[in-house]
Image (cartoon, rainbow, N blue to C red):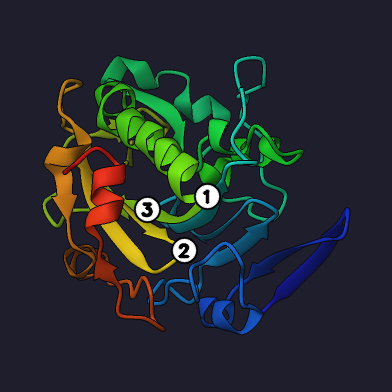
Amino acid sequence: MRIVLKIYFSVLILTLHNIAYAQAYKIGHCYNGCPEGADDSNHLIVRPIYALSYNTTTKSADWVAYKVSGTSIGIASSLSRDAVQDNYVKDTLTAEDFLDSERVDLIRSQYVSLIDFAGTPFWGDVNYLTNNVARTLSLSQGAWYGLDWSIRNLVNRQDEVYVVTGPIFDIEENSLVLLTDTPHRVPDRFFKVIVNNIGHSAAFILAQSAAVHVHHCEMIATIDEIEGLTGLDLFPSLNLESGDSVYSGLGCL
């Protein structure tokens, strides 16, 4: 195992090659422990506003965890969204890989939204390519946008929430690929689980094929379903309960 430690303005950033060690560091971005079950060769990167487990084979994070609060949300209209190469993981997609993405209805998107952390000095961390992924335009402008917007509304009522999100690759490959030198497969679906500070949760599976008018509340799932599809144990220390207050706060009840 190789561990790289850096201190930036009193903030610890880790890159680990054994994800099992995530629990030992009690990472605050995760709700009572980070997900387990990702490949041991993954890179665990912990930044001031999120933690993620990056898979260099799929060139996507297997999971990304973060906590959104009323003070972290801000206005992002004037902030840069330019991609930034991650110095800790060289084997990622590049900004150039996304240049022709709109030809196949894909755009460079972020797991952690810029708006959610525009109120912090660390908003630029969302632009690292390890936090980027190819998503369809219709999903980005539809259910994904709607769910993120609803999460911010929930934060306004409940002060803070924890989010864990990531990709789902179906067994049957589809034709959704980035037009890189070697066509690169992108996720078929995404999962997103929201947990409030008393442990009530809401879970969603968001399909890349979803039309722009499809509401996120039509994509409700269970944590067990997500774990079965990804092989992850999202909350290894807990048995979370689905919470009506969370779903209603997200506009689903």
CB of mark 1 within 8 Å of CB of mark 3? no
Cα–Cα gap, marks 1 and 3: 24 Å
The reply to whether discs 3 and 2 touch (Cβ–Cβ < 8 Å) is no
Label number found at residue 166 = 3
Residue sitting at x 70%, y 66%: 14
The answer to whether marks 1 and 2 mark residues whose Cβ atoms lie closer than 8 Å is: yes
Q: Where does the image place residue 69, in percent across and percent down from the top left?
A: 57, 47
Residue at x 45% of width, y 28% of height: 108
| Above or below, 179 relative to 203 | above
Q: Could you tell me the amino acid type at mark 1?
A: Asp
Q: Report how far apart the C-alphas of labels 1 and 2 lie in the structure.
A: 9 Å
Tag 3's secondary structure? strand
Sooner in the amino-acid sequence: mark 1 or mark 3: 1
Residue sitting at x 26%, y 65%: 230
Mark number, residue 159: 1
Badge 2 element: loop
The quarter in which the C terminus is drawn is: top left
Quadrant containing the N terminus in the rendered view: bottom right
Q: In this view, does 54 lie to the left or right of 147?
A: right
Could you tell me how far apart the alpha carbons at marks 3 and 2 are, in whole angstroms?
A: 21 Å
